[in-house]
Amino acid sequence: MKIKLLAIICLLAFSCSNKYKDVANSEQDYQIIPKPVSLETAKGRFLVDSDTKIFGAPELENEGEYLAEMLSYAANVNATFEAGSSGNIELRLDDTIENDEGYSVTVAYDNIVISGKTAKGVFYGIQTLRQLMPASIESKTNQIEALTIPAGTIKDNPRYVYRGMHLDVARHFFPVSFIKKYIDLIALHKMNTFHWHLTEDQGWRIEIKKYPKLTEIGSKRNGTIIDHHPGTGNDETEYGGFYTQEEVKDIVKYAAERHVTVIPEIELPGHSGAAIAAYPYLSCFPEEPTFVTKDMGSKKGKDIQAKGTPKIVQETWGVFDDVYCAGDEETFAFLQDVLDEVITLFPANYIHIGGDECPKENWKRCPKCQDRIKKEGLHDEHELQSYFIQRIEKYLNAKGKRIIGWDEILEGGLAPNATVMSWRGTKGGIEAAKQHHNVMMTPGHSCYFDHYQVKDKEAKAKEPLAIGGNTTVADVYAYEPTPEELTEAESKYILGAQGNVWTEYMKTTDYVEYMILPRMTALSEVVWSPKQSRNWEDFHSRLQHFSDRFDALQLNYAKHSIENK
Ligand code: ACM
Ligand code: ZN
């Protein structure tokens, strides 16, 4: 009797999955962004049900659990990952895959195999599988009655090793929960780096235990200008926030589980106003009041200055003369201490040290800086900036870290091992590659997501306030990170590209989402997919499907950038 019952159950289960064996799929079932290197469709669908079991190499437990959680939003499914050799979704490490981030996904009606050279490749295979499933999988409610996945084989690997998204949390601060959401978006797009811009004139956002005033004083400003720079007044509202070291560790761990590297940016020698407000001795002129655009400073800030505290956290946007003193040894002692703590929190090989927009006016007037120029045999203040960067590079190199700097670090001579982030167009990137330095491309015209995303004057007037410029989703999609000016050998130094998100005018997380989506989606294909497969019409059509995922995830994306071509 028992055997009979078992036979009936087996037959039922078999006929149930068999039902999907010969199902014909349509093109609509295979809408993947970024476009994979190769995709072969097939007949049949895999049914995710209560029998679904994920298994594979024990090293892939993190990826297995990530996939199990994704599938658990289907009705009546409680898939788990088990190291071993039995189940119907296999995660496999495969040495024959050449690219470290490469993967293959094979879906048949009765099993799925996801292989990667590394766990990272397997993770990207899972992201592809995710897009073969309906968008409703994203809504995280157990609601999909019969979750099925179309059969086929995908073999894929990225074009560039560096695929980044930057976020400025200093002009406006965003909570840990949003940083995690941002990292999830990076992972969805098979991007691999989060560039976290943590320090600025308008706020210091990371706890440094040896210098508590950095967050006690430096993380708060007394007000913020209203409207576009130079502003129409001050909102007279205290604004602040910072991440504790425990929160930073939690975020770095969360990112690592999603194969996202977090690169912290600690700006120097410019954009250092918040640190100077906390520790005025870091300035060339500790007694000189912080300059806030005339009539735009808060009453509270002015009062504090009038009562004998000249340095305050900046309340308006722009580039400011008050920068770290390059002549004083105490500046370097401070920065080395800060970097020592930063290094322990971020396992990334790289630390971004800024280097952009550092006016030389104070250095020209400062006896200590002038003395440094003389003693070191430097020609001018540009070489003093180069001295500054090279000294920090040497310190970090000795600790096993490499530096990235904005393209101004080329001026006065590039530090020997520095990587350049080209933002003022592509010129800096080209020059650095010709000097055989690694480069990430982030040129304003294509990669600045703080620009308006429409060109038409009338449409622009309806958009939320932005910094200026125009970078449409089509502009981003048309961007080619490897400049024609480079030889094949020089092109190897172009590691990839990144979207930059400066938040002067992005006060809310909703607004950040609006500015990055779908522009980061376009960039994800630029940095991942083969150059020859780039096709705007095709991408735009896949984007319609992809945006269903944004809806399910309740993201505030720029719908008009998807609807209009
Ligand atoms: C920058 O946009 N100042 C790097
Ligand atoms: Zn100085």
Image (cartoon, helix red, strand yellow):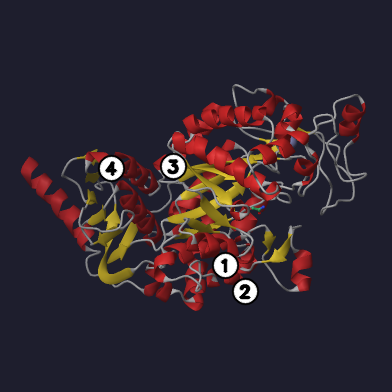
**Hey, what amino acid is under mark 2?**
Asn
**Hey, what amino acid is under mark 4?**
Leu
- Whether disc 1's CB lies below 8 Å from ligand 1 is answered no
Quadrant containing the C terminus is bottom right
Q: Mark 1, mark 3: which one is toward the viewer?
A: 3
In primary-sequence order, the first of circles 2 and 4 is: 4
Q: Mark 1 and mark 3: span between their CA atoms?
A: 28 Å
Q: Mark 1, mark 4: which one is toward the viewer?
A: 1
Image x and y of residue 98, in percent: 26, 59
Q: Mark 2, mark 1: which one is toward the viewer?
A: 1
In primary-sequence order, the first of circles 4 and 3 is: 4
Secondary structure beneath label 3: loop
Residue 529 found in image quarter: bottom left
Q: Label 2 belongs to which residue?
A: 564
Q: Mark 1 and mark 4: span between their CA atoms?
A: 34 Å
- Would you say the residues marked 4 and 3 are in contact, meaning their CB atoms lie under 8 Å apart? no
Q: Label 1 belongs to which residue?
A: 476
Q: Label 3 belongs to which residue?
A: 349
Q: Mark 2 and mark 4: span between their CA atoms?
A: 41 Å
Give the residue drawn at x 29%, y 64%: 155
Left or right of 394? Residue 242 is right
Work out whether residue 202 can be spotted.
no
In primary-sequence order, the first of circles 2 and 1 is: 1
Image x and y of residue 449, in percent: 63, 59
In primary-sequence order, the first of circles 1 and 3 is: 3
- Would you say the residues marked 1 and 3 are in contact, meaning their CB atoms lie under 8 Å apart? no
Residue 60, numbered label: 4
**Hey, what amino acid is under mark 1?**
Val
- Would you say the residues marked 3 and 2 are in contact, meaning their CB atoms lie under 8 Å apart? no
